[in-house]
Every structure is written in structure tokens, then in C-alpha cells.
């Protein structure tokens, strides 16, 4: 077959209705815990159901969507593994929260104090001075078993994987294909009528025209956004620039690459559209220039003269 086909086999409502019975969830959990496929009798024993007929009914309901029948026994399909993975994240069963943590890095927009907060399954990096906030959904399992002092580095690493996933063309919500669009903030998102109370006047003026990336998912319709500084922080030219100066981007807190001001990120031209983001170490600077499709069209280096 030369032609690639993508076919929806079932309605989402129909598929998820299969999980409305606790016995079926127990079957999925038993297969998740098993190292190898389980025979019918072994699976029924693991679940703890005495009525063979009832067990067979619930198992048959799962076969095809979440469970696969093989010569060796029953095992999870990829969908079944993902359901178990979602349970393990704690998103449906766990509530995690902790007091805001002060970060050692200043806000790159105004120099104020940054804090990390986690509530409602969302990490927020917020400036106490200008109220600039980066908010990203993070499942509770990311922080399971972690010490409080490790939270900032763990959060940074997880956020990095989220941005890398989008930059690689995959939706962080459904793994569908995303198409990036770069434009001034006023065109990418709906700006509030009134900015946060403590926003600096200069930032209020700059904000509508700062470049922003929107990733439109062609599958689920979600449209997460990101600043250019985050998108290109691990671009080969950028990692090389930092490496030459003794800095490992992989272990650098990701919020150091957030800068909502025209000193670091700006729209250069409208026709053709060009936007740029600059990375600096001391007096040296590297600038990445992109088009509206997020394609790099130029990389500029400026060496300090001091």
C-alpha cells in the first residue's frame, strides 16, 4: 500500500464509555502491572472477579480498543498503555501544591524577583514586579518523590521537553501535527483590554508588537504559544554559541531564555515578515532571524569590542 491513510475507527464518546465500569479499569491496571501477556484465567485471578461470565463480558468490551488478544494471552494496546499512563501522571487522582519558590534568576524583562508556583496542575513562573507570567501545564507525577529544592530544576527540564515537542512538530496535548505561525503578539493571541496593573509602561507599549509563535494543532485544534527565546534556545547555533562560552544550555534554567522586550525579541519587517531573537553573553551576541513559518533565514553573530 503506497498511500498513507488515517482512519478514525470509533467515536471518542463510544471509546471512553468503555471505561465507565470499574471492572474494566481493573483489567487495564492488571495488564499494566503484568510483565508478559496474561492468560484468561490468570487475568481474571489478578482482577479478582469470581463470575467468569461477567469477567468475559467486560474483557470482550475492551478487546480492540484497549486490549489485544494474542496467542500468548491478553496484553494492552498502545491506547491501553496511554490510559494507564494518564492514570500514573496523577492528573485524575492526585492533587499537588506547594508554596511559591523564589528563583535565583531575575526577570529578564524588568530585573524583578521570579517565583515558581504550582497549582491546578500548572507551573507558573511569575515576576513579582512586572507580573509577567509563563504558565505551562505539568502533571503531578513530574514532582512525585522530588525534594522541594529540586523542584525548579525538575520543572525546567520538563518545560524544556514541552517546547522541544512543539518545535519538533507535535502537539503536547494529542501528539497530532502542529503548524507554527510567527507574528506580532496582537495577531497571535487575543490581548486583554487592560494589561496587568504593574506592567511597566514601556512593556505595555512594546507588548502588542513583540513576536510570538503559535502552534496550531491540525488534530485537536489546540493552539499553544511560545516566545522565540524559548523556541530557539536549543537550536544548534545557539547551543554552540553558549558552549563556546562555557555554558551548557541543557542545564540552564529555561526561564533565562524568556525576555518580553524588544532588546531581545522583535519584529524586523512586515513584508517579507521577519522576526528575530537575540542571545547574549557578556558583550557577545547571537541573533536568529526567522520568517512567518518559523524557518531560520539568517544567523548573525556580533562580537563584543570591550
Image (tube, grey):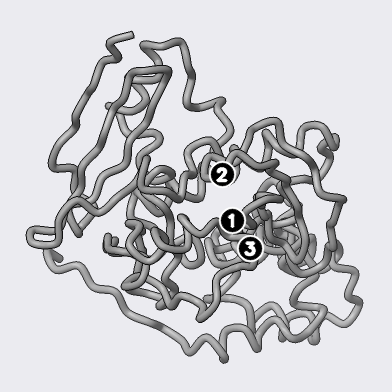
Q: Name the residue under label 2.
A: 110
Please state which of residues 9 and 258 is positioned toward the viewer in this rendering.
Answer: 258
Mark 2 or mark 1, which is nearer the start of the sequence? 2
Q: Residue 266: horizontal and vertical position, in percent?
A: 30, 50
Disc 2 crowd rating (10 Å Cα; few below 14, some 14-19, many 20+) is some
Mark 1 against mark 2, which lies toward the viewer?
2
Q: Which of marks 3 and 1 is nearer the N terminus?
A: 3
Question: Mark 3 or mark 1: which is in front?
Answer: 1
Q: Which mark is residue 2?
A: none
- Residue designated by label 3: 74
Instruction: Please state the horizontal and vertical placement of residue 235, each as a whole percent of the image.
Output: 32, 34
Q: From mark 3 to mark 2, how far is it between C-alphas?
A: 58 Å
Q: Is mark 3 on a helix, strand or loop?
A: strand
Q: If you read the primary sequence from the N terminus, does the residue marked by circle 3 or circle 2 appear first?
A: 3
Discs 3, 1 touching: Cβ within 8 Å: no
Q: Is there CB contact under 8 Å for labels 1 and 2?
A: yes
Left or right, 161 with respect to 9, comes to right
Q: Is mark 2 on a helix, strand or loop?
A: loop
Q: Mark 1 points at which residue?
A: 132
* Location of residue 42 with respect to 62 vertically, above or below: above
Which secondary structure lies at badge 1? Answer: loop
The residue at 64%/67% (across/down) is 197
Q: How crowded is mark 1: few (under 14 residues within 10 Å), some or many (20 or more)?
A: many
The residue sitting at the front extreme is 201
As drawn, 194 above or below 135: below
- Residue at image location 41% in from the left, 20% down from the top: 281
Amino acid at each position: 500500500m503506497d498511500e498513507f491513510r488515517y482512519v478514525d475507527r470509533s467515536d471518542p464518546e463510544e471509546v471512553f464509555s468503555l471505561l465507565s465500569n470499574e471492572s474494566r479499569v481493573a483489567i487495564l491496571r492488571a495488564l499494566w502491572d503484568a510483565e508478559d501477556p496474561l492468560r484468561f484465567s490468570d487475568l481474571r485471578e489478578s482482577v479478582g472477579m469470581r463470575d467468569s461470565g461477567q469477567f468475559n463480558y467486560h474483557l470482550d468490551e475492551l478487546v480492540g480498543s484497549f486490549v489485544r488478544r494474542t496467542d500468548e494471552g491478553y496484553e494492552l494496546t498502545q491506547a491501553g498503555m496511554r490510559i494507564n499512563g494518564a492514570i500514573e501522571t496523577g492528573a485524575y487522582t492526585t492533587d499537588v501544591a506547594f508554596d511559591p519558590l523564589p528563583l535565583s534568576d531575575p526577570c529578564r524583562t524588568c530585573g524583578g524577583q521570579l517565583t515558581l508556583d504550582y497549582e491546578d496542575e500548572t507551573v507558573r513562573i511569575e515576576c513579582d514586579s512586572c507580573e509577567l507570567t509563563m504558565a505551562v501545564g505539568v502533571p503531578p507525577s513530574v514532582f512525585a518523590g522530588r525534594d522541594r529544592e529540586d523542584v525548579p530544576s525538575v520543572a525546567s527540564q520538563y518545560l524544556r521537553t514541552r517546547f522541544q515537542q512543539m518545535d519538533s512538530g507535535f502537539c503536547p496535548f494529542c501528539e497530532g501535527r502542529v503548524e507554527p505561525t510567527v507574528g506580532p503578539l496582537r495577531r497571535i493571541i487575543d490581548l486583554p483590554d487592560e494589561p496587568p496593573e504593574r506592567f511597566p509602561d514601556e512593556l505595555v507599549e512594546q507588548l502588542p508588537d513583540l513576536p510570538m509563535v503559535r502552534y496550531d494543532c491540525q488534530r485537536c485544534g489546540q493552539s499553544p504559544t511560545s516566545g522565540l527565546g524559548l523556541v530557539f534556545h536549543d537550536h544548534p547555533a545557539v547551543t554552540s554559541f553558549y558552549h563556546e562560552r562555557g555554558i551548557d544550555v541543557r542545564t540552564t534554567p529555561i526561564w533565562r531564555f524568556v525576555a518580553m522586550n524588544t532588546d531581545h525579541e522583535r519584529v524586523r519587517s512586515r513584508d517579507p515578515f521577519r522576526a528575530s531573537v537575540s542571545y547574549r553573553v557578556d558583550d557577545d551576541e547571537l541573533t536568529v532571524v526567522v520568517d512567518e513559518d518559523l524557518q531560520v533565514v539568517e544567523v548573525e553573530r556580533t562580537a563584543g569590542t570591550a
